[in-house]
Image (cartoon, grey):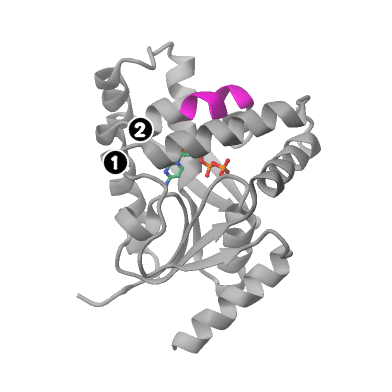
Amino acid sequence: MGKVNVIAIDGPAGSGKSTVAKRLAKRLGFLYIDTGAMYRALTLKAINEGVDFMDEKALIELSRKTDIELKDEGGSLRVYLDKKEVSEPIRTMQVTGKVKYVASIGGVRENMVKLQRSLGACSSGAVLEGRDIGTVVFPDALHKFYLDASFKTRAKRRFDELKEKGFSITLEEVEKDVRDRDASDKKRSIGPLKKAEDARVIDTTDMTVDEVVEYILKKINEKK
Ligand code: CDP
């Protein structure tokens, strides 16, 4: 089987994946798939339904009967959970703090990966961003990138982003969240955050979003 027309972008929180992936998809006319938003949506549903985060079976069952859709509305990605828009509530610190429980369960990941593959395969081209895109979801992606940046830079970016959205939060709280999520994303046994062997690493610490996008486009064109 040939390689699929997918650009896989993986990396830790605050490495710039979302902004870069969004812009890249727009430039190429590709579908943009934010896989983190899917794990967040499921986490929100578990909170709303009072599911015990230690109950793996219940969380797997929940992932099986949950409808998650990503829609491009006027150039911005909107997330729908069981037909209801949840683009904003999935970004709260409450959801961010709980997502690790959902994301570390193999049965949940299987269902999410299935959905991600079917979305990517239906499109004529897609940019997927997450933690395990190049390793698990689309190991046969045409292009793979792994974005990273220093811890301080990543935490500061996330802090600025949350502030801009109006969240009242301290830099220390954000640093703690990023540190915790880095650790749990790397250590889980299924679909951990990991660079695919054939992924190109980009250290975005001292790069602007535009520079990263241009660099990726250049690398993609070189391969054609
Ligand atoms: O934007 P940020 O990097 O903070 O996170 P996100 O992409 O919205 O993902 C939220 C969480 O979902 C991550 O911390 C991961 O634990 C999980 N996730 C995952 O396990 N696998 C993915 N492919 C994407 C996200």
| Viewer can see residue 2 | yes
Please identify the quadrant where the N terminus is shown: bottom left
Tell me the crowding category of disc 1: few under 14, some 14 to 19, or many 20 or more residues within 10 angstroms, Cα based: some
Please identify the quadrant where the C terminus is shown: bottom left
* Residue at position x 74%, y 64% in the image: 208
Is residue 78 magenta-colored? no
* Residue at position x 59%, y 53% in the image: 18
218 to 69, vertically: above or below: below
Kindly check if marks 2 and 1 are in contact, taking CB atoms under 8 A apart as contact.
yes
Please give the label number shown on residue 190. Answer: 1
Q: Position of residue 92 (x, y in %)?
A: 63, 27
Query: In whole angstroms, how far apart are the C-alphas of marks 2 and 1?
Result: 7 Å
Q: Assign a secondary structure to mark 1.
A: loop
In this rendered view, identify the residue nearer to me: 221 or 85: 221
Q: Position of residue 70 (x, y in %)?
A: 49, 47
Residue tagged 2: 104
Mark 1 residue type: Ile
Q: Main secondary structure of the magenta part?
A: helix
Q: Assign a secondary structure to mark 2.
A: loop
Please give the label number shown on residue 170. Answer: none
The residue furthest left is 1
Q: Position of residue 57 (x, y in %)?
A: 24, 20
Q: Is mark 2 within 8 Å of ligand 1?
A: yes
* Residue at position x 51%, y 53% in the image: 11
Q: Is residue 120 left or right of residue 85?
A: left
Q: Which residues are magenta?
A: 93-99
Q: Position of residue 15 (x, y in %)?
A: 61, 52
81 to 31, vertically: above or below: above
Tell me the crowding category of disc 2: few under 14, some 14 to 19, or many 20 or more residues within 10 angstroms, Cα based: some
